[in-house]
Image (cartoon, helix red, strand yellow):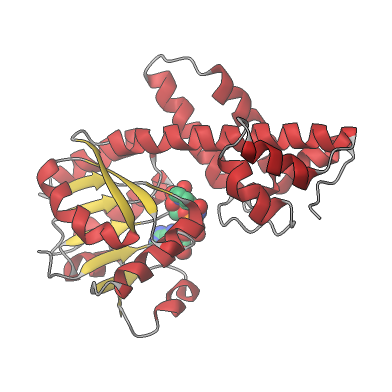
Amino acid sequence: MSEDKIGFIGVGNMGGPMALNLVKAGRRLVVHDMRPDSLKPFGNQVQIASSPAEVASEAEIVVASLPRPEIVHDVVFGDKGVAAGTRRKIFVDLSTTGPRMAKIIAAELGKRGVVALDGPVSGGVAGAVKGNVAVMLAGPKREADIVAPLLAPMGKVFYIGPEPGMGQVMKLINNVLSATAQAATAEAIVMGVKFGLDPTLMIEVLNAGTGRNSATDSKWPNEILPRRFKGGFATGLMVKDLKLALETAEDLHVPMWVANAVKQLWLYAEGRGGPDQDITELVKHLEAWTGVTVKGK
Ligand code: NAD
């Protein structure tokens, strides 16, 4: 199976560079995306398919990197979906879709003789381009062992466990922390600027101290201080991840006071700036409240 083509559905901000890294590593790909623009970077290096069913009739292993759970469900089970393909044996969902959807997909595909794995990724667009995302693979070990080496050019593949959804829960935990770091950092830096502190110096100090986190480490120096705001992750997708995390916590009767407060701030940002605003633009809403602009030198 390892010599076979890999099907890749959804080549947007994350899927595009991850699929390109597979191509660079010599994997043969059959690709589908509903936006013709997203297929341009591949030139004639991959086979293009006109539907998910066509992908799944060409490849035994089909991976998807799509925005939301309901879209993944539709791409798998809808008209001309993956399930309608003739060759598909393993489906891997690289999207962040939560454990509920992972369980539904695994159960429904299982009835059709297809093994589903969840394999959400972390590392952002920068990690996807560099080939160093973390892939959080879960599902039957036998199929995970087949898939892991095939996806290795995308980054580091971790096997989280045998139950569908375990990779998704790992990913949601990661994003709760990432969303919290960004929200808390934005609040704190805005407070410092309001007092008259220099934001560039503040980030340098935090990165030399215990306040260091994924926002101070890369997002602030690369995207926010230069006011580029091109992190490549939409606010609407972050809100989706926080909703999935809190829904999972509720299913488990686990209280999450901090994550609920963090979600309110992201919902506010989504309401004001729209779902397509880059996540690094969160700080703009705190600037508007306080009347300061955070700009690096
Ligand atoms: P994106 O919107 O940039 O890419 C999604 C792609 O799927 C697009 O090219 C779109 O055209 C395609 N698509 C949508 N619906 C489709 C359909 N019905 N049929 C075929 N193609 C379809 O999103 P993204 O930022 O690449 O995120 C993808 C997933 O990865 C999401 O679940 C997101 O939460 C997760 N994720 C994103 C990042 C990030 O930094 N952007 C990081 C980690 C995980």
Q: Quadrant of residue 190?
A: top right
Question: Is residue 34 shown left or right of residue 101?
Answer: right
265 lies above or below 143: above
Q: Quadrant of ligand 1?
A: bottom left
Q: Quadrant of residue 290?
A: top right
Query: How far from the left and from the top, in percent, is residue 135?
Result: 33, 48
259 lies above or below 133: above
- Front-most of residues 20 and 95: 20
User: How many numbered discs, if any?
Assistant: 0
Query: How far from the left and from the top, in percent, is residue 38?
Result: 47, 71
In the rendered image, the residue lying farthest to the front is: 208
Question: Is residue 66 shown left or right of residue 50?
Answer: right
Q: Residue at x 32, y 71 (%)?
A: 31
Q: Residue at x 60, y 36 (%)?
A: 212
Question: Is residue 49 shown left or right of residue 232?
Answer: left
- Front-most of residues 201 and 174: 201
- Front-most of residues 45 and 124: 124
6 lies above or below 68: below
Residue 267 at least partly seen: no
Location of the C terminus (image quadrant): bottom right
Q: Quadrant of residue 139?
A: top left
Query: How far from the left and from the top, in percent, is residue 95?
Result: 38, 49
Q: Residue at x 43, y 59 (%)?
A: 128
Residue 256 at least partly seen: yes
Location of the N terminus (image quadrant): bottom left
Query: How far from the left and from the top, in percent, is residue 44?
Result: 35, 85
148 lies above or below 102: below
